[in-house]
Image: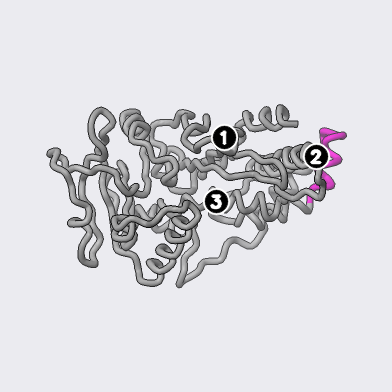
Amino acid sequence: MRELLESTLTELVQGEGAAVVLPQFNGVYMTDCTRLVWRQVGMKLALRLELQRGQLQACLTDLKQHDQKAAVVEYPLPPGALHLGDLGFFKLKRFRDWSASGVFWLTRSKVGTRLHTPDGQPLDLKAVLTGSAAVSIPVIVGCGRNAVAAHLLAAPLPEAALTKRLARLKEQARLDQRPLSQRQLELAHWTVYLTNVPALTFEQAHILGRTRWQIELLFKLWKSHGQVLHSRSSDPLRQLCEGYGKLMGVIIAHWALLVAGWQHDRLGALDALRILRTHLPLMQRAFTYFHLFADFFHWVHHDLAHAPPLAKRRKTPLAFQLWYEFEVAYP
């Protein structure tokens, strides 16, 4: 079952047509890892999601292996692509290589990272992050042969967001059994991004930074609605087999939606999955009578095209609304 799953993960399926999400970039890639733990066994899934056409690249790793060592992290990206990753994938050598090959990247700044001005002078981040206005300055990140040119974009957090961040940092420090440093507490008052995307404002960088949550939502969809981690058996081997099978199921469902023409900016992933579920009896029969696959994709495409589109929100805009704002504001 594991070999079958790993064979599934090597298949690359993507939607057709022109990019409709953040078309300024030649692909918008997000990389992250999630823990798949049943009662007695577990593993880690490293996944790279391409947002514009939905392509998935993934690999399985040991639970104790660091995210940086997952093979999917080193898969090449095309020139003009944008990569969005969390601090678990912060690596200066990788940023430097991407910049040299024409790949754009954006990441949160990591506490303790050495920053310098373009002329090589050490940069005191505490002295720069003052006041209430957004900050945008060119910097050199790191030192030595792995140093990379970037832009630092920062803005202070609203009071409500700051309270939540401090609570989250304190809880993580409690779990790690280590105290929060004074520097962590000081920098927690600001949201700081590092990027090589040219002529970017903080507001635009924040839209891109929020986009990374699409891969977290995909994990949530698989676990909560795909029931990937659910098993009634106490047998570890059965738990693994069920988990492998369900993981293959959600990946095939993702492929089917892409082939049928699903787009992130028009219909939510959960609503698209619900539409697909209504056609599963036809899909099941198509595995015996292959000519029925044409009917299956026809009806899924029909229902996706005629489903009510995502509603816009005025106070707290959805991701697709922010993507449209970015497209208008960024040349």
| SS for callout 2 | helix
* Callout 2 touching callout 3 (CB < 8 Å): no
Frontmost residue, 251 versus 114: 114
Distance (Cα) linking label 2 and label 1 = 26 Å
Q: Mark 1 points at which residue?
A: 57
Q: Can residue 139 be seen in this view?
A: yes
- Quadrant, the N terminus: top right
User: Which numbered disc flags the more N-terminal residue, 2 or 3?
Assistant: 3
Q: What residue type is labelled 1?
A: Gln
Range covered by the magenta-colored residues? 279-292
- Where's residue 300, x and y in %? 72, 48
Distance (Cα) linking label 1 and label 3 = 15 Å
Local crowd size for mark 1, using a 10 Å CA cut-off: few (<14), some (14–19), many (≥20) = some
- Say which residue appears at 81% left-offset and 50% top-offset: 232
Query: Is 68 within the magenta?
Result: no
Q: Mark 2 points at which residue?
A: 238
Q: Which amino acid does label 3 sit on?
A: Glu
| SS for callout 1 | strand
- Say which residue appears at 46% left-offset and 53% top-offset: 177
Camera-side mark, 2 or 1: 2
